[in-house]
Amino acid sequence: MKSRILLLILLLPFSLLAQEFDCFNQVDDDGDGLMDMADPDCSCYLFNEVGDSQLTTTPPAGNTGQYCFDITDDLNSQLGAIWLQNKIDLNNDFAFRAEIYAGNNDGGADGFAIVFHDDPSGTGALGLDGVNIGFGGYDTFWGTYDALDAVSPSVAFEIDTYDNGVSQGDVSPDHIAISLNGDVYNPISLPATTALPNIEDDNYHDVLIEWNSNAQTFYFEIDGVYSTSYTADVVNTVFSGQNLVNFGFTGSTGGFSNRQTICITGLDLPSAGTSGNLQICNGTPQTFDLFDQLGGAPSTIGSWTDPLGSPFGSSYLGAFDFTTDALGIYTYTVQNNSGCNAPFSTVDITTSTTTYTLNSTNNTACDSGDGSLIFSSLLGNATYDLIYDLNGNTISSSISITSDSIGGYVLDGLANGDYTNVLLSYQGCVAAANTVKIYNVCDIPQGISPNNDGINDSFDVAWLEALNINIYNRYGTKVYEKSHYRKEWYGVSDSGDELPVGTYYYVIEVSGRSPITGWVYINREN
């Protein structure tokens, strides 16, 4: 079955808002009912088959990859290749993983090659069979190399499974080597060849090819053990300045043969990372980089668009300023080099403000435990999380409170004490810490005896740190007032006259809560 059948899948509808990010994991990543290569999101990984190569749904047993091709059948003089239908960009990093099956006959031939090329034939390119492994241009009859017969210009990583003899530049064991422009007799790898154990063993073998664009280095590995590398400015020295090149596998047989199969397990292209979100709480943070909100390992070659789809920012960082930039979903897109739907991720910027007013009521009797925290100016019918310290000890877990329709809530049944580090949060946004005190009424003197004996001579409420106090006689006439009151009242009026024995009423104003009211008795008996 040829890959053109797979192209029919492209006619199916799909959403750009969900992607099949891994086309080789046998998981329906985007939940659209189409998995891996059956999903049009994976159309960029379609290969064009040339010569005797063909897609197979019945690969030799033992494979883990599900997208498999027979490069050759177990027949003499087979010649085939598969080329990624979309070019890759050598200006960006690239990694390809596959598993190869080289057959079950150690006397079979001839092997595979992983090839990067800019041959004029494009995805139809083929070299010669036999020792050429499908990409080379060596004429074994005449003993000459002709670039016109090769896949050229090219960089090829050979997996050679047959010894064609010293006269044809070969070595005895299975081996790997690197060749340029299909010149199979003059490998440029150092050492020229790296020996492998017999891989025509009826088993699959893992293959990795990586390109590091910054280091300009290819790294080639089999089974995590046998490797070679090549460092060069190939864009200029091999491909004459062309960074977009074809990529694929070739293979051949000659007078001897094996079934030679490849199953693709991974094609790694620049990633956009994973989506994130940030809530700006009470205006903080005000400035930040959108890139820092992404998860995973996003590439730095991407760009941002704002919630309206317009370009945003001057670099991959996406510098955001809360005072000038709109809230909403920002999209980070990495233009990849294989024709895939460009990978993207998003950052959802939201804002929330948590504000409220906090007051308290005191215990109505000594240690009665019926004080309360009174919250107001909340959102109506909203659920908040509350945590606080009582006398320096943090409560064990947060409390969920739900405001009434007008934004109020009373947390009652509370002991007296210092309620500090009161933290109220709504949808993860925490308001500024608050502090309030619940008093025992018995802590406020109910009587004074201003006779200069040093005992209860004044009305001492210094611990309240009152902002103001007003004292009234039983007729409601104000007789005394003092701001920033502590313990200055000795039972006298504002004019300094002694007040008669009796009951007086006070209104004490303190910070952060309702005024405290009560009575105090003046006793002047010796």
Image (spheres, rainbow, N blue to C red):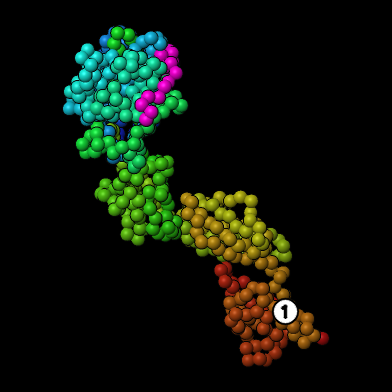
Residue at the spot of label 1: 521
Residue 362 vs 141, above or below: the answer is below
Q: Is residue 23 above or below residue 241?
A: above
Give the residue at x 31% y 11%. Answer: 73
Q: Nearer the viewer, residue 108 or 95?
A: 108
Kindly tell me whether residue 138 is visible in this rendering.
yes
Residue 356 position, x and y percent, is 49, 61
Image quadrant in which you'd find residue 69: top left
Q: Residue furthest right?
A: 526
Q: Can the viewer see residue 100?
A: no
Residue 241 x %, y %: 21, 38
Of residues 516 and 39, the one nearer the viewer is 39
Q: Residue at x 21, y 36 (%)?
A: 240
Write the residue at 33% across / 39% down. 216
Is 19 left, or right, of 353 in this rendering?
left
* Magenta: main secondary structure: loop
Magenta-span inclusion, residue 203: yes
Relative to residue 340, is residue 106 drawn left or right? right
Which range is magenta? 190-204
| 361 within the magenta span | no
Disc 1 residue type?
Answer: Tyr
User: Where the N terminus falls, by quadrant?
Assistant: top left
Q: Position of residue 317 (x, y in %)?
A: 35, 51
